[in-house]
Amino acid sequence: MKPRFISRRQVLALSAGAVVLPSFGASFPDRPIRMMVAFPAGGGPDLLARSLAESLRATKGWNVVVVNRPGAGGNLGTAEVAQAPADGYTVLFGHVGALAVNPSLFKQLNFDPLKDFAPVGMIATSPLVVVTGPGKPYASLRDLLAEARKRPGQVTVGYSGSGTISHLSMTQIVALAGVNVLMVPYKGASQGLVDVMGGNIDGYISSMASLLGHVRTGKARALAITTANRSPDLPEVATVAEQGFAGFDAVTWFGMTLPAATPAPLVAEWNAALQAALKSPELVERFRVDGSVPVATSAEAFGRFLKAETDRWGKVVRDANIQA
């Protein structure tokens, strides 16, 4: 058999084709990376994302630029990453709402969190806290639910935003307790905090970050924390699980994803960079101040967690007939 020779034209064609393949490894990144945050600038998630971007610069030398795309409950920014080129240069600072709740909450989405993203890893979790006002007689979540059992539909618990993780967590607690509580929605945390501290509602559920200062000053009394274990910031406050709901664990969480077609080696490189950044003492302290805890996982573990959270909160949304 005669040897087969490749023409110069074929070599040039192959070379031209090669340049469109994803380029990563020692040369990655060779330009700024966009970290998409589906929240307004200046809020809690935005500050966490900017802290992570700074840590990636410090630990890897990567130029990570935070881009804010708020709107539609996080769907706008999340969809933009799903549709971005799978080259590692657009990454999502994802949130439980858009990635695990919204698929059930919204009738139509132009992305599928389980199909349109490559999970990279967890970033952080933040507990929720149930509080009451200083003038109320409740010392625990158990007391609040006992009162709701005595007076069906008359005990009031506030939350911020329909379909938020605070709303769904309290909905699940009430369903597990088998009591009738009047849920009071607020557009934002500020008015809900005013009402619970002033005694206008019996309870309020929100993030640790928004409530911790008020609890420490005595303006609000913590009744329960939603995580599986007690928080070092409020060690005296019993968990929901300790108050009769074994296994209950609900958190606000953030995780990183890339477009689904991103090559596996690039996903692995991103995961390694993320894990290194999350170990930075400066980042750990910044997260702690905001009531969040860095959580480093493998890409595979985050993928399994995302599927479990989607199933869990989807059931809560459907059972309670919650709509966006």
Image: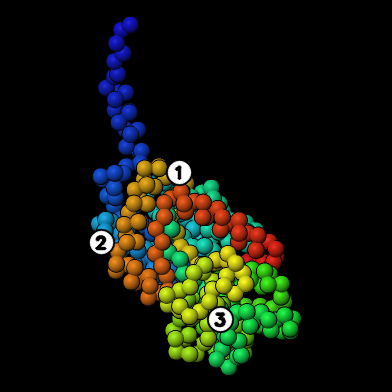
Is residue 63 positioned above or below 150 on the image?
above
Residue for point 36% across, 42% down: 265
Tag 1: amino acid: Ala
> Which mark identifies residue 223?
3
Is 126 left, or right, of 195 in this rendering? left
Q: Secondary structure at mark 3?
A: strand
Residue 112's disc number = none
**Residue 258 visible in image:** no
* Dot in front, 3 or 2: 3
Check the picture and name the quadrant holding the C terminus.
Answer: bottom right
Q: Which residue is mark 1?
A: 261
Above or below: residue 292 compared with residue 60: below
How much space separates mark 3 and mark 1, taking CA atoms?
45 Å
Q: Position of residue 239 (x, y in %)?
A: 54, 73
Residue type at mark 3: give it.
Leu
The amino acid marked with disc number 2 is: Ala
Q: Say which quarter of the image contains residue 144.
A: bottom right
Residue 276: quarter of image: bottom left
Measuring 29% from the left and 52% from the top, which residue is drawn there? 31
